[in-house]
């Protein structure tokens, strides 16, 4: 029993550390303050403890303990709604909102990371119980650390989703005015009546064209949530030349209905082409927007995709 | 929770020669500007006040719409 106890403690600590490593704070803004970290780390440690207890409990033939795992799953499902609620409330006060699609993706990831930690701790605890328990404490510690590190790298690589650069060729576009209408190359954006706003767009505006690489990419990029995510991330990374009373400077992503190409029109705070193109490339493809019409016969005959090579 | 009128014309600013193009009815006031400069200025003020975007119908009529 004492042996199991040390195994549980070791696996739980390593699992908790794994949750800490998976908790990254960047331009996504949340969590940043210690309270945000504490709530996620606490749940992460609980997940790790559950994963660590499962195998020793089975070995001791304590089957009731294993059923507690299902109770935990219910607990973690609440994380998703908690995240969704918090982020939706914050989103209402963003100059360029994330959009519901993006929030749903983030909330889902937060929930899934706890299951991941639980699974990883299970593997760590299995490695400890079957391979390392008889080894010297030093070797045991190093072995477990190495397992945790390998799991971390695997999780990071496997869980990494696609990015917009995988779906589309991204290139700078030219901002043109035809009368009051603003275009990036030949993609229409909006009608602008103020001469002052037109001058700002011509002087400081930047246009990007995204050419989808296939039918599926075209269908995925057409999703409004996906387009909002592109606008949000570009605005977040490059800064935005806009306030509440200048809605005409809101970054827009519009679609050319004939070819499925997307255009992005933005006035960033920093006028840096490399940074803007890089920002668009790094936008995650949202799970909810992925669609694969090419898998069906009818989908392959869609007319809204017409690849135009440069 | 705030309420606002979106996708509705909140104000119309016309030049004297195009004021007959706007009939009565619909939403928002119609302002007649003396010249193009004044029209632009009124449109700018109205867009800042209403947090709307100014659109040009290209016949001397500017409308302010909140999106």
Image (cartoon, rainbow, N blue to C red):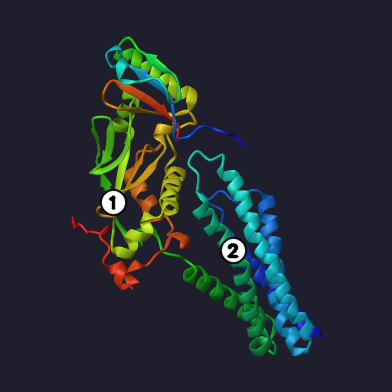
Residue occupying the point 61% across, 68% down:
A18
Q: In the picture provided, is A271 more to the left or to the right than A89?
A: left
Residue occupying the point 28% across, 49% down:
A256
Residue occupying the point 69% across, 68% down:
A74
Q: Of A121 and B24, which appears nearest the observer?
A: B24
Q: Where does residue A41 sit, x and y in percent of width and height? A: 68, 61
Q: Quadrant of residue A203?
A: top left
Q: Quadrant of residue A20?
A: bottom right
- Dividing the image into 4 quarters, which one contains the C terminus of chain A? bottom left
SS label for mark 2: helix
Q: Where does residue B43 sit, x and y in percent of width and height? A: 39, 20
Q: Which one is in front in this view, the residue at disc 1 or the one at disc 2?
A: 1
SS label for mark 1: loop
Q: Where does residue A34 sit, x and y in percent of width and height? A: 68, 51
Chain letter of the residue beneath label 1 in the structure image: A
Q: Residue furthest right?
A: A1
Q: Residues within 10 Å of mark 2 (few under 14, many from 20)?
A: few
Q: In the picture provided, is A258 more to the left or to the right than B6?
A: left
Q: Of A236 and B11, which appears nearest the observer?
A: B11
Q: Earlier in the sequence, mark 1 or mark 2?
A: 2
Residue A93 against residue A290 in the figure, above or below:
above
Which residue is disc 1 drawn over?
Answer: A257
Which residue is disc 2 drawn over?
Answer: A21
């Amino acid at each position: 029993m004492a042996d199991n106890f040390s195994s549980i403690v070791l696996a739980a600590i390593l699992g908790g550390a794994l949750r800490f490593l998976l908790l990254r704070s960047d331009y996504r803004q949340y969590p940043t303050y210690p309270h945000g970290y504490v709530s996620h780390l606490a749940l992460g440690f609980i997940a790790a403890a559950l994963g660590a207890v499962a195998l020793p409990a089975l070995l001791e033939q304590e089957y009731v303990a294993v059923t507690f795992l299902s109770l935990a799953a219910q607990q973690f499902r609440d994380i998703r709604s908690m995240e969704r609620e918090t982020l939706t409330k914050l989103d209402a006060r963003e100059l360029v909102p994330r959009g519901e699609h993006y929030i749903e993706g983030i909330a889902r990831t937060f929930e899934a990371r706890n299951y991941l930690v639980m699974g990883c701790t299970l593997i760590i605890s299995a490695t400890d119980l079957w391979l390392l328990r008889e080894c010297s404490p030093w070797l045991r510690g190093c072995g477990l650390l190495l397992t945790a590190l390998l799991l971390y790298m695997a999780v990071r690589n496997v869980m990494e989703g696609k990015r917009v650069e995988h779906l589309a060729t991204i290139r700078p576009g030219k901002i043109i005015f035809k009368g009051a209408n603003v275009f990036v190359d030949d993609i229409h954006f909006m009608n602008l009546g103020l001469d002052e706003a037109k001058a700002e767009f011509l002087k400081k505006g930047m246009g990007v064209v995204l050419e989808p690489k296939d039918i599926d990419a075209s269908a995925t990029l057409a999703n409004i949530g996906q387009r909002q995510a592109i606008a949000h991330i570009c605005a977040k990374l490059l800064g935005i030349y806009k306030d509440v009373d200048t809605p005409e400077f809101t970054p827009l992503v519009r679609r050319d209905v004939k070819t499925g190409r997307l255009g992005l029109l933005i006035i960033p705070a920093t006028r840096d082409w490399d940074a803007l193109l890089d920002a668009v490339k790094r936008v995650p493809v949202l799970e909810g927007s992925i669609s694969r019409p090419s898998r069906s016969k009818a989908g392959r005959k869609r007319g809204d995709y017409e690849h135009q090579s440069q | 929770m705030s309420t606002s009128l979106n996708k509705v014309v909140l104000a119309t600013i016309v030049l004297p020669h195009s004021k007959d193009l706007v009939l009565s009815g619909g939403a928002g006031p119609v302002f007649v500007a003396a010249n193009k400069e004044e029209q632009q200025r009124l449109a700018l003020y109205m867009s800042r006040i209403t947090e709307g975007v100014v659109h040009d119908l290209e016949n001397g009529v500017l409308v302010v719409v909140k999106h």
